[in-house]
Amino acid sequence: MVVSEFSQFSPYANLPGDPTDWMYDPPVLSAAVGWHQPNYPDDVTLVQRLVNIAIDNGYLEAQAAVRLDEEGQWDEELDSAVGAIEARYLSGMASPLGQKVLANGSPLFMFLVHLAAGNANLAVQYSPVMYQLARVMLPGRLAARNLSLYLPNILQAMAFNGVADTEMVLVALASIRAETSSVAPVSEGVSRFNSTPGAMRHAPGTHTFDRYDNRSDIGNTGFPDGASFKGRGFVQLTGREHYADYAKYFNWPLVTKPDLANDPWGAAALLGKFIRDHESRIRNALRRNDLRAARRAVNGGSNGLTEFIEAMNAGRRFLQQHIAGATAARLTAQAGAH
């Protein structure tokens, strides 16, 4: 079996069994763990084992971490080790409110799974300013919650694909704003763009996403392709052909298990690869400051253009203010030193 470069990097690649199964069945907790959490002994033991793998492999060498007792109790040693991992490798972004709580799907827990699998991209260091930038570009309470869950995965995938520079990250975040206001990998909803009026009324003999069924331009060959290969993920991957192309690249069963495109890690991986695949067109558009063309390079049209432009402009304003503020602080400090 040919394994793609990115599949080897995937946090699921070296876990027991078929790695694609881990996207559906990763290690799970029965409840949250951390201070003042349920802390069921089996859950805490799982976290202690994952942290010990990190310690055994030297990931906390700078902290001279001592191996934890796997006795199933959340104590100061475990809390300190988890905090060191979060601070060193995620720069505090995984718990922006300062709460080192691990739960299924949370960035801290998933990062521990990455470490245990030996596939975390430890070269990636996330600046805390990235969370602030994302909050500005993707406003709202629901977006803020989901950013704490998904932003580390998104930035990791962008970095792996060599497109984690400022402008391309702006495009990725603005694309998410245009595609899914909740900042979560979701499936496309029923609308007049993908379903006929009868299908939207659930008329007898009709089915939703029927407008997509015979779209040969995206590789669909008839019912039930429309619903099977509807838009999913951060960039709304759509059509049998696109699912098949990315399935081949990642060595993932996207055609037979299309919901993998909504897996938090899978959605981030697809976003990073999609941005890289369209990198030349996006950069050319940005050099001309043609945001409409940049959106078209990602979406193929102008859907969500207003939201895309708003997010791009908000991100650029934030960065200008941040850079100006940081420069002023440095000059003031230098003046004081003299």
Image (cartoon, rainbow, N blue to C red):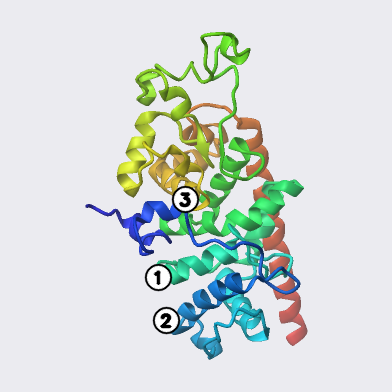
Res 122 seen here: no
User: Is the residue under label 1 in contact with that under label 2 (CB below 8 Å)?
Assistant: yes
List x then y, in percent, for residue 18. Answer: 34, 55
Q: Which residue appears at 59% of the width and 36% of the height?
A: 179
Distance between the alpha carbons at the discs numbered 2 and 1: 9 Å
Q: Which residue appears at 53% of the width and 90% of the height?
A: 66
Who comes first in sequence, dot 3 or dot 1?
A: 3
List x then y, in percent, for residue 40. Answer: 65, 70
Label 2 secondary element: loop
Q: In this figure, which residue is indicated by the disc labeled 1?
A: 118
Q: Judge whether 114 appears above or below 312 on screen.
A: below
**Front tag of 3 and 1:** 3
Distance between the alpha carbons at the discs numbered 3 and 2: 26 Å
Who comes first in sequence, dot 2 or dot 1?
A: 2
Mark 2: few/some/many CA within 10 Å (<14, 14-19, 20+): few
Quarter residue 290 falls in: top right
Left or right: where 20 falls relative to 317: left
Q: In this figure, which residue is indicated by the disc labeled 2?
A: 57
Q: Nearer the viewer, residue 204 or 199?
A: 204
Q: Nearer the viewer, residue 266 or 207?
A: 207
Who comes first in sequence, dot 3 or dot 2?
A: 3
Amino acid at pointer 3:
Tyr
List x then y, in percent, for residue 191. Answer: 60, 21
Res 51 seen here: yes
List x then y, in percent, for residue 19. Answer: 36, 56
User: Is the residue under label 1 in contact with that under label 3 (CB below 8 Å)?
Assistant: no
Q: In this figure, which residue is indicated by the disc labeled 3?
A: 24
Label 3 secondary element: loop
Mark 1: few/some/many CA within 10 Å (<14, 14-19, 20+): many
Amino acid at pointer 1:
Gly
Q: Nearer the viewer, residue 208 or 268?
A: 208
Distance between the alpha carbons at the discs numbered 3 and 1: 19 Å
